Amino acid sequence: MAEKELLKRTVYCGLVGEAHSGRTITVYGWVNNMRELGGLSFIDLRDREGLLQIVVNETFPTPDILKDIGKETVLAISGMVVKRSKPNPDLPSGKFEVIASRITILAASEVPPFIPENRSSVTEELRFKYRYIDLRSQAMQQNFKLRAKANLLTRNFLDKEGFLDIETPMLTNATPEGARDYLVPSRIYKGKMFALPQSPQQFKQLLMVAGFERYFQITRCFRDEDLRADRQPEFTQIDIEMSFSEQGELFSIIERLMREIFALRGHDVALPFRRLSYQEAMAAYGSDKPDLRIPYTIQDFTDPASTWNSDLLAATLAQGAKVKGLVIPEAGAFSRKQLDEINETGKKLGGKGVIWMKKGDDGFKASLKIGPEHMAAFFRQQKIDDRALVLLVADAESQALSVAGKLREHLGKNFQDKDRLEFLWVTDFPLFFYNEEEKRFDSNHHPFTMPRPEDIPLLDSQPLAVQAIAYDLVLNGVEIGGGSQRIHDITLQHKIFHMLNLEEKEIDEKFGFFLNALKFGAPPHLGIALGFDRLLMLLSGEDSIREIIAFPKTTSSLCLLTGSPSAVSQHQLDELGIAIKN
RNA sequence: GGGGUCGUAGUUCAGUUGGUUAGAACGCAUGCCUGUCACGCAUGAGGUCGCGAGUUCGAGUCUCGUCGGCCCCGCCA
C-alpha cells in the first residue's frame, strides 16, 4: 500500500472551537459513530481530546469512500469549520462541525468487539483482551492523563524540596522475609537467581549512606502474591528517603505533596492530617487502616455486659473475653433478615456471631436473652439513641476488635462518599509480631525499622511491647503508604536480625554488604513509600487499581492481552540450566 | 490453598419440570432515507450454550471434573 500524503493536523477534534470557525482544518481520529441519512452523512470523529462532528454532504467529491468507513476506522479529514444551527451541548466542540472536503482512510478496522464508550457494559475479561480498544474510551484517557499529571507534579514537587531522582537495580537479590519474590535466573551463573525488587529498600538506604541526603524514585515493585482489587503483582511506588531529619518533617512534606496531587481534581485537602497511634486505631476502629468517613467507632461494653445476667455471655467473659460494640445510628429499624445477615457476616469474618440489641415500638429486643430492664439501663447510661442499633461481639480482645472493625467497614458502605477525603497517619506500630506458624518474631514493617529509643531497653524483656518509629498513611480506609525511621547503628541492626532468628551465616550472605555499609558512617535517615497506583485509584474515583494501570494482570496473575506468563523454548531453559518439574 | 459468584449469537442478556428448528435487544450486512447526534424504516446473516466426562430414550438445563473473569479469606505493606 502506497504511503498516503499526510496533511499536518490543525487541531485535536475535541478542541475545535470559535478560533477555527470559518477556517479549513485537518483533523485525525477514529470513527466513534456514523449516521447516514442518504445524501447526507455524519461522522463523529474521536481523538484523545474528544469528539467532533463531520458532515459529508452533496459538496463532498468522493462519497463512495463512505462504504469503506465503519466504527473505529482511522481517518484524516479536511474541511471547513462552520457553526452548527443546532448545537450539541453534550460535546465540547458541539457548537461547531466540519464540512468535509477530503477524507483519507489511514487504517481500516474490523467490527470491534465493543465500542470504547460502551466499555462499562462489557465484561472486564473482554476489556482485558482488547485493552487497546478499552483504553480509547474517554474515561480511560482521562485516567491516564491524570496519572501523567500526578507523576510530573510529584517529580517537580520533590525536585523543589531537594530530592534527587536516582534509579536502583531491577535485578537484585531475593529477600529472605516478606512477600514471595519474582526470580530471574542467571545464565552465566547457573542455578543462581536474581530477584525483582519488592521495593528498593536497601538501595535507598545505601543512597543515604552515600550522602545524597534526599532521594526519590517513582519506580516499579514486584511481589508474587495473590491479587485483589487494589493489588497487582507489579505496581508503582513513590519511594522517598531522607537523612538528618525526623518524622514530623517527613509528614509535612508528604502532606503538602498530597495536597498538590489532590488539587488536580479540585480537592482542597486540609493540613495537617489526623494522627492515631496503632493502639488507638485498633481500639477505636479494629483496623490499622480505618476509614474515618464512617462516623461510628468501636466501644468497649465489657463492664455493662457483665451485669446482664446472661449465661452465655458470662461463660465467654469468664474466659477473659471482651465485649466490643458498635452503635449504628438510625439502624434500629433493620429487619430480622438484615440482622440475620449481619450475624452471618460476623461469623464469616471469623467471629462467634453478632449479638444485636435495639428498641422497637414494643420495647427492647435482643438476639440474646437479656432482661429489658438491663437494656433500658444500658441505653440510658451509654446515651444511646432509641433509633440506633447496637451490635456486640464477645471474644478475645484482638479477635473481637478485628470482627467489630470489619463489621464497621461492612455496614459503613453508605458513608463512603468518594468526594470526601479522610487522610490519617497511623503511627507507633509494634516493632514485631509473633509468627505462630514459624514460632518466632517477625518484623511488622521490615527488619531495618528503628525501635522508639525509649523502648530499646524492652527488646530483651518484652519484645512485643516495643514500638517502632513506623507509620502508615491511610486515605479512606486504603493504605496508601508506609515507612519508618531506619536503624543506622550496626550493633542495633545486628541485634534485630538475631531477634528475627536469622542465622549468622544467613545474615552475612543476605545482608553482609548492608551491615558493612553501616560501618562506614551511615547517617540517621528515614523514609516512606507511597502506592502510586492506589493513590491514583482514589484520586480518579475508581474502585480498582486495574483502571489506572494500562496493561494490568487478572486476579489470577494472567495477562489476557499477551497471554503471559507463557512457556519458553527448551533452548532457553537449557541455557539457564533449568529443568521444569511436573 | 479456601469460600462466593458469573460463563448461551460480535456484545449484553432471556431460556419454564430435562423434550420439536435455542430467543430478544444492540451491533453487523443489504436496500431506502438531506440535519442526524442512541437517526429512522425494511430485509437478512449470525450459535463448539467455556471445555471434558457422566446420568438419561433425550442435557443449554441434572451430576462430577476442569478452564477463565470478578469479589472476599488466607497470603501480601
Image (cartoon, coloured by chain):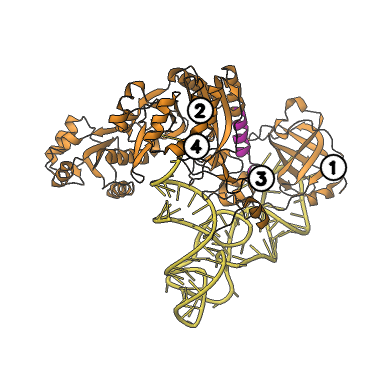
Q: Is residue A135 magenta?
A: yes
Q: Which amino acid, mark 2?
A: Asn
Is label 3 in contact with label 2 (beta carbons under 8 Å)?
A: no
Which of A1 and A367 lies nearest the eye of the viewer? A1
Query: Residue A449: image x %, image y %?
Result: 42, 28
Residue drawn at x 66%, y 52% is: A575
Q: Secondary structure at mark 3?
A: helix
Judge if badges 3 and 2 mark residues of a common chain. Answer: yes
Tag count in the figure?
4
Precedes in sequence: disc 4 or disc 1: 1
Query: Residue B45: image x %, image y %?
Result: 69, 66
Which of A92 and A160 lies nearest the eye of the viewer? A160
Precedes in sequence: disc 4 or disc 3: 3
Query: Residue B34: image x %, image y %?
Result: 76, 46
Q: Which chain is yellow?
A: B
Graded by Cα atoms within 10 Å as few (under 14), some (14 to 19) or many (20 or more), the crowding at tag 2 reads few
Which of A104 and B33 lies nearest the eye of the viewer? A104
Q: How far apart in space, not on screen, are marks 4 and 1 (Cα)?
A: 72 Å
Residue on which the image places disc 1: A60
Letter of the chain that mark 4 sits on in the rendering: A
Residue drawn at x 82%, y 36% is: A78
Q: Which amino acid, mark 3?
A: Tyr
Quarter of the image with the C terminus of chain A is: bottom right
Letter of the chain that mark 2 sits on in the rendering: A
Graded by Cα atoms within 10 Å as few (under 14), some (14 to 19) or many (20 or more), the crowding at tag 4 reads some
Q: Which residues are magenta?
A: A134-149
Residue on which the image places disc 4: A510
Q: Secondary structure at mark 2?
A: helix
Residue drawn at x 58%, y 25% is: A154
